[in-house]
Image (cartoon, grey):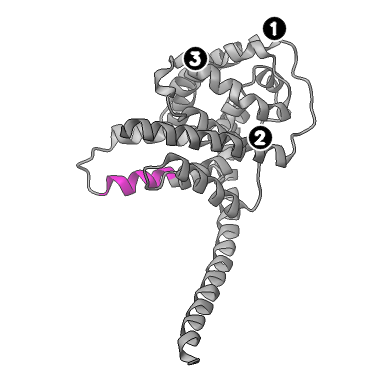
Amino acid sequence: MNPDSWLLPFAKGLMRTFLLVLFTFFALIFAQKITIAAKRAQNICAEHFQKLHHGPWRSALICGTSLRGEEDFENLKSLGLIHLMVVSGAHLMFLDRWLRWLLRPSLPGHVFLKQGVLFVYGFFAGLQAPLLRSFFSNGPGKSVSLRLILGGLLTFLFLRQWTLSLSLSWTATLLVQWPHSKKLHGGIHSLLIALGLCPLLLSLGRPFIGAALFQPLFSMYFGGILFPMTFLGTVLPLEPLLNAIWKIFFFSLKLGEQFPLSKSMSENSVAWNVLYTLMLQFFFWRAEVKLRRRNSW
């Protein structure tokens, strides 16, 4: 047997493996450095809001800081709305819509400008798992399932840990983009999303089941008024209006006192979070395949 017949392919394979290991090594170092820098940027973002009225809540909504220990935090848990105050892909979705409205398609480089603005915001929000997953999931490809799987796995590899916020973000996206969901009434779809998140939200406390009826209304207020106006308040003088908007928010949270208090529960295991998310991902893929086959007939 001629040694040259296998030596060259073996050497090429060895070189590719070496380059892959080298790339992974430097990618992990880069991920660590940029994560540290993003945390510092998040602290700068939080310091800006701490000086304002309702500063901790504004900081949590825009910068992704923790709300634990704040007044009305338990009411937020009782209503099962704590996940809405986590900086996630929903924030990027709202910003993306505004930027599409502001940046005309005829503007040179409008796509790169839009992506740059979204990344800068994500950087100052600490590059948290939901934001990274949203970035990684917005790649090319017709298969939504494939993009969501790759987005989740790349986020896990980047952060090197599986967090509850990653499961919540991934699961919420699956429920929002579920095949056939466009045929559902908006209120019914919102209710199904709230119920679908309950198995993961149990680790934050056990919300009263009746609070799920309140979530669709609060979600519309959050997405249409609270977040956009608070975000615009960082560059525009809107303090009187913002104070009124946040008063309505806290008045709504008082409704949480009408429900049984959220009971402390042991945190769900990472295995359960992974299993539940991947199970939904599997059923999402099955539904997507069936819908594609039906449309091809």
Residue 23, given in percent of the width and then of the height, sits at 52, 68
Q: Quadrant for residue 209, please give it.
A: top right
Q: Residue furthest left?
A: 106
The residue lying at 36 percent from left, 30 percent from top is 294
Q: Name the residue under label 2.
A: 66
For the residues labelled 1 and 2, say whether their Cβ atoms are less than 8 Å apart.
no
For disc 1, the neighbor class at 10 Å (few under 14, some 14 to 19, many from 20) is few
Q: Residue 258 carries which label?
A: 1
User: Would residue 111 be seen by someone viewing this image from the given angle?
Assistant: yes
> Would you say the magenta stretch is mainly helix, strand or loop?
helix
Q: Mark 3 points at which residue?
A: 188
The residue lying at 55 percent from left, 75 percent from top is 18
Mark closest to the chain's N terminus, 1 or 2: 2
Element type at mark 2 = loop
Q: Residue furthest top?
A: 258
Q: Residue furthest front?
A: 1
Element type at mark 1 = helix
The amino acid type of the residue labelled 1 equals: Gln
Q: Give the range drawn in magenta.
A: 109-118
For disc 3, the neighbor class at 10 Å (few under 14, some 14 to 19, many from 20) is few
The amino acid type of the residue labelled 3 equals: Ile
Mark closest to the chain's N terminus, 3 or 1: 3
User: Would residue 51 be seen by someone viewing this image from the given angle?
Assistant: no
Quadrant of the frame with the C terminus: top left
Q: Residue 235 or 82: which is nearer the viewer?
A: 82
Is residue 184 shown above or below 38?
Answer: above
Residue 98, given in percent of the width and then of the height, sits at 35, 32
For disc 2, the neighbor class at 10 Å (few under 14, some 14 to 19, many from 20) is some
Mark closest to the chain's N terminus, 3 or 2: 2
The amino acid type of the residue labelled 2 equals: Ser
